[in-house]
Amino acid sequence: MKNHKFPLLLPLLFAACTHAPKVADHTAEDRNKQIIQTYFNEAWNKGHLAVLDSILSENYINHTPSTPNPPKGPAGLKPIITAIRAGFPDLHYGIKDIIVTKDRVVASVIMTGTQTGTLFGIAPTGKHIEVNQINIEKIENGKITEHWRVTDELTMMKQLGVVK
């Protein structure tokens, strides 16, 4: 008597053993991490402001206390980045630590640069800064919708020689 079950099982076993496991689709967390890396590397570090149009919502709200009530959306952030990069042409943000959820990213970063240009009315000092920041970004539908930042501005002003 022939065993009819074995020939039916063989193709299934072969398929299970020879096919590579499927790679999971990128999670919301992966996407959000990439958005924040693009935000710092492209917009802040390189000054590619056009990228903001694709990663910030039109209703993006910047809650940063040192720049109160800028216009909503990318148009409100572009002049801020332009002004800070004018003060620090070698501006660089390094991500030290990042915590990512489905709708929030918290990034601990270090901002470095040499002030060779005017910075919000502060004449060029030629001094190098190294300042810690905590940034919180709310992300919805693949775009940053809200931003909160805390910068050690006192340390920055001391490093620039503006305060003692």
Image (cartoon, grey):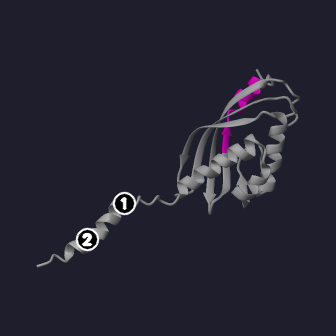
Q: Is residue 158 magenta?
A: yes
Read off the magenta span. 149-159
Which residue is disc 1 drawn over?
18
Amino acid type, label 1: Thr
Give neighbour class at mark 1: few <14, some 14-19, many 20+ (Cα, 10 Å): few
Q: Considering the image in quadrants, where does the C terminus appear?
A: top right
Of label 2 and label 1, which has the lower sequence position?
A: 2
Q: Which residue is mark 2?
A: 9
Q: Residues within 10 Å of mark 2 (few under 14, many from 20)?
A: few
Q: Nearer the viewer, residue 11 or 33?
A: 11
Residue name at image x 85 percent, y 37 percent: 86
For the residue pair 49 and 102, the one nearer the viewer reads as 49
**Residue 141 place in picture, x, y as percent:** 62, 63
Residue plotted at (67% across, 54% down): 146
**Residue 59, how many percent across, how many down?**
73, 61
Q: Residue at x 77, y 55 (%)?
A: 74
Numbered tag placed on residue 50 in the rendering: none
- Picture coordinates of residue 7 (x, y %)? 24, 73
Is residue 62 depicted above or below 154 in this figure? below
Give the quarter of the image for residue 116. top right
